[in-house]
Image (tube, grey):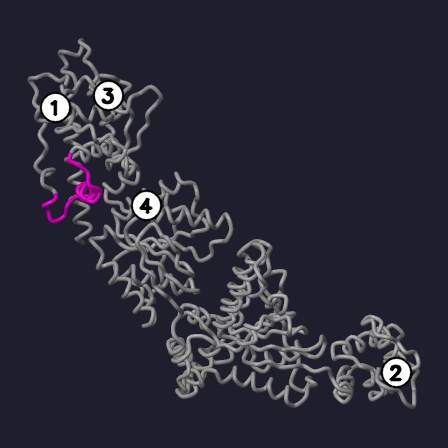
Amino acid sequence: MTDHTEWQTENDRYLGEAVAWVRNCLEYLAPAPAAASTPAQPVADVGMWRKRSAGNTPLIAASPTRSRPERPAALRDVEQGAMPPALAILARRLNLSPFEQDVLLLCAAMEFDTSIADACARAQNNISRNYPTFGLAMAMFDEPAWEALSPQRPLRYWRLLEIRQPQGVPLIGATLGADERIVNYLKGLNYLDDRLGVWLQPQRQDSGAEGDAAPAAVPPSQQRTADRIVQAIAAADGGVSLPAIQLLGNDSASKRAIALTAAHDLGCELYLLDGETLPTDAAEVENFARLWQRESLLSPLGLYLDADELDAGAAGDARRVALNRLLLRVGGVTFLATREPWPRLTRTSLNVETAKPAVSEQQLAWQEVLAKAEQADEQQTRRDAATLAGHFNLNLADIRAIAANAEAPALGPLWDSVQLYARPALDQLAQRIAPVAGWDDLRLPPSEKALLRQLAGQMSLRSAVYDDWGFRARMNRGLGISALFAGDSGTGKTMAAEVIARELNLLMYRIDLSAVVSKFIGETEKNLRRLFDAAEDSGAILFFDEADALFGKRSEVKDSHDRYANIEVNYLLQRMESYRGLAILATNRKSALDPAFLRRLRFVIQFPFPAPEQRQEIWRNMFPPETPLEEIDWPYLARFNLSGGSIHGVALNAAFLAAGRGGAVSMPMMLDAVRTEFRKLEKPVNEAEFQWPQTEAEPT
């Protein structure tokens, strides 16, 4: 027989004797049969008991020839037993007096024994009063106390009783019933109250070992954070003044893993409450807090308040007020997950910085995955693991999930699996670009092309420089790379970003300003934060086209709009500096950018307008091999002063003209398309220059 089974047996035996004693006490109050014809005054009336110097002693309507039933020996001094019953445990944890304990037992007995209802009716000499009342309890039990009716005493404060008080009925005569959760607790069933289950989510992690309730092991860096939390809580005064633990940082999964580990070490079961679903009504918050506090006293529980995604504005402020009120009302082990510390908390707090596993820890996790491959080479495994850890920033749980979905434990399949894993979060906020251009497609001066190759090389060698050469230990920001592509429209800025993305085999996303910028205060920063966090996990390249729209100069504050616009720019400055991936800003108005951004850029690459020689190469490579072409005078077309983007538009228009006429692309068609492009760009059209062939013509 297990300890729990033995305790359950003893608890059932205790309840059986306790209910029998309650029934005897009720029978003792019932009028004697001989006096049945003489109606007795119901004991629910306040006049049925009077105060004596020794305490409140009830006047009972029973025959003086009968003696009051004594409390059985098994119900006395139960606290001293090796296995106290649930009622005794509840009374100790919720600070119930002996009389309050007996009142609760009377109400619970109604659920355990169907004959109690009839006994209540007989004891009160009223067939319609087949329910417990405070008045009946005061007549039944020793040392009755009027204070037990107080809302601040445990019976009502902890919602142990359900009181049904019709209009005009005094509290002492109101119907009493035991709370369902408490009845089950007394019977030995311990579970979270259903009324809390609507709001709370149990937090568990699979340990990988069947039957093991311990959470999955966190890396050493996060374990040290959890140990610090455990030490701080253990040092508190008996759990009365436990500090709320503010878990700070950008990664919600890391915070939950640390909190779960700390709760497990403290012997607590952790439950999560999403701050966005918390009711803001003060009465609902109070009811939730009261029930949670009761649950945490009956069972070792920890509360995780997730405030990471609280919206800005009135709705978010209201929920912050509700969370602050909740923190004040609840005790026990409590975690508050936020990105930044909350000022002026109503409860003592301990701020704990959290982070994803260190790069070295992620590398070890990748090595474990790669080592599962057949004929895995140890040295190659370490190199591949370093490559994955250098480009991607993931939790151990994410790494395990990605490995489970990969086709094979090898660098290529794992790389593709990471990108598929990260795409859903990014697709909501940015436009994915599938890179098709290569180095041969770029028509740039050698110096600019060399800078682009240097940029790509730094991205691929980050792990060697930061980790193997020790730079990461000396840097807490600037681990990513920011670059500015400046030049006129159509000079190849977007194509250059595609070339780098293809070279590095990384996702590339063009930022959609319509999905990021919001007129509501704080929404833009929230969207940008989500974008940067998701891109950082996947190692994606962020391409900010027309970057001056987001990274413009901060202005003098004249009104609230200026202030909040400057806040957005300040946030971008900080986030760009801490971003560990590649962010590319493209603009044709470099002078419009805030100078603070320029200081934080590692590369500034100027894209010049193509010279005639470069334009000729662009023209020759613009048409695919499958396109039917007549004789084209490429040097003549290169005389027209057009950018690469404009040349692409001309070639496409000429191809459609040829397809519409059912023939090949001819030189007159090309000139017609050039003329159309000039008019679109509002450039002057000199018809003499569009007469082909010509002997001499100056570039337009």
Cβ atoms at labels 2 and 3 below 8 Å apart: no
Q: Which mark is residue 57?
A: 1
Distance (Cα) linking label 1 and label 3: 21 Å
* Image position of 266 with respect to 400: above or below: above
Residue assigned mark 3: 121
How many C-alpha atoms fall within 10 Å of the one at disc 2: few (<14), some, or many (≥20)?
Answer: many
How many C-alpha atoms fall within 10 Å of the one at disc 1: few (<14), some, or many (≥20)?
Answer: many
Taking the magenta stretch, the answer to whether it contains residue 326 is: no
Q: Nearer the viewer, mark 4 or mark 3?
A: 4
Q: Nearer the viewer, residue 505 or 73?
A: 505
Left or right for 577, reference 26:
right
Circle 3: element type: helix
The mark nearer the N terminus, 2 or 1, is 1
The residue under the point 24% across, 25% down is 133
Left or right for 599, reference 301:
right
Q: Give the image location of residue 173, x and y in percent.
A: 26, 22
How many C-alpha atoms fall within 10 Å of the one at disc 3: few (<14), some, or many (≥20)?
Answer: some
* Image position of 256 with respect to 658: above or below: above
The mark nearer the N terminus, 4 or 2, is 4
Circle 1: element type: strand
* Circle 3: residue type: Ala
Circle 2: element type: helix
* Circle 4: residue type: Arg
